[in-house]
Amino acid sequence: MLDETFKHAKQKTVGLKQTQRALEKGRVRRVFIAKDAEIHVRRPVLEWCDSHNVECIEVPTMKELGKACGIEVGTAVAALLNE
């Protein structure tokens, strides 16, 4: 399901910095975050999503999230943006 979600998404971010910028601008519809990402990476994103009512979906591993995003390395965070 995750692979299909990102394949068909027109607007998305991959990586912590890009996703944080989009969050600050209020452009994020849904966040995907890897369960195995370090807590100092996860905590601020989870808190932001909670306080702004943005859906946050946990993915088992960074490697799996990276693959779904179409990159060969793992990523801790990715997001689908409002279109």
Image: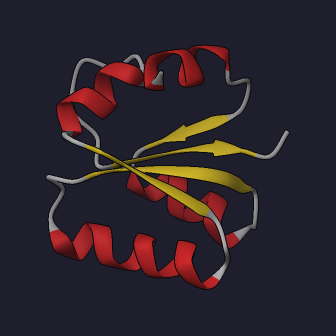
What residue do we see at 30% from left, 68% from top?
42
**Location of residue 41 in the rendering, given as x and y in whole percent from the top left corner:** 27, 68
72 relative position to 26: left or right: left
What residue do we see at 52% from left, 55% from top?
19
What residue do we see at 54% from left, 15% from top?
4
63 relative position to 69: left or right: left
**Location of residue 53 in the rendering, given as x and y in whole percent from the top left corner:** 67, 74
Q: Is residue 38 above or below residue 70?
A: below
Q: Is residue 43 above or below residue 54?
A: below
70 relative position to 66: left or right: right
Q: Is residue 71 above or below residue 44?
A: above
47 relative position to 58: left or right: right
Image quarter of residue 69: top left
In the rendered image, which quarter contains the C terminus?
Answer: top right
**Location of residue 63 in the rendering, given as x and y in whole percent from the top left corner:** 19, 30
Of 33 and 22, the residue lying toward us: 33
Image quarter of residue 50: bottom right
Q: Is residue 14 above or below residue 20?
A: above
Q: Looking at the image, how many numbered discs can be counted on the residues?
A: 0
Q: How is the image coloured?
A: secondary structure
